[in-house]
Image (spheres, helix red, strand yellow):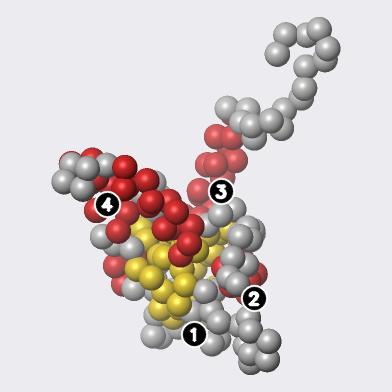
Amino acid sequence: MGHFLGTHQSRLDAKGRVSVPAAFRAALRDGLPAQAEGAAEIEPAAMILRPSHQHPCIEAWPAAAFHALAAPLAQYDVFSDTQDDLATALYSDALEIVADKEGRIVLPQVLRDHAGITDAIEFMGIGRIFQIWHPDAARQRRDQARASAQSKRLTLPGSGPKPLAGEPA
């Protein structure tokens, strides 16, 4: 599966549609099997849109990644409060969306309200998913994330300097 990279600006049209950036559409298709020979065009990939638990934005998940995320719910008793709470949080406001031939999707009003989106939009790639933000909130989030990573001196596991032979790890 491809990675979602970069920040892309766009606007909603009068019908509440927006074009998903071409690079994001390509990343969504990365996980699909190859088109049959002679097929006229690549089939658009499904994505799951849902309100973020942590931020005032919309999360966009490749359908396969979302289903893999939710698979561990099967470990809980179907009638447990834990399973019910997690399933409700994941699924109740999630929608499967497929872009049209021009790469446009309709952003449902409930999701736009969650993200405070009226017309201007920023798509923000964050690796395995992308997010859809109001531009001001997106800038604040990027600034906050950079400041947090810097103040906590965060690094990726295994990416820091290696101790020299004989030095404690």
Q: First in sequence: mark 4 or mark 2?
A: 2
Quick check: 120 above or below 131? Answer: below
Q: First in sequence: mark 3 or mark 2?
A: 2
The dot on residue 43 is none
Q: Mark 4 against mark 2, which lies toward the viewer?
A: 2
Image point (63%, 28%), residue name: 153
Q: First in sequence: mark 1 or mark 3?
A: 1
Q: First in sequence: mark 4 or mark 3?
A: 4
Q: Mark 1 against mark 3, which lies toward the viewer?
A: 1
The dot on residue 87 is 4
Quick check: 124 above or below 41? Answer: above
Q: Mark 4 against mark 1, which lies toward the viewer?
A: 4
Question: What x and y, as percent, mark residue 23?
Answer: 65, 69
Image point (59%, 28%), residue name: 151
Q: How many marks?
A: 4
Image point (69%, 30%), residue name: 158
Q: What is the three-letter code of the residue carrying label 3? A: Arg
Element carrying mark 4: helix
Q: Which residue is mark 1?
A: 100
Element carrying mark 3: helix
The dot on residue 34 is 2
Q: First in sequence: mark 1 or mark 2?
A: 2
Within 10 Å of the Cα at label 4, are there few (<14), some (14-19), or many (20+) other Cα atoms? some
Q: Mark 1 against mark 2, which lies toward the viewer?
A: 2
Q: Nearer the viewer, residue 8 or 120?
A: 8
Q: Which residue is mark 3?
A: 142
The reply to whether discs 1 and 3 touch (Cβ–Cβ < 8 Å) is no
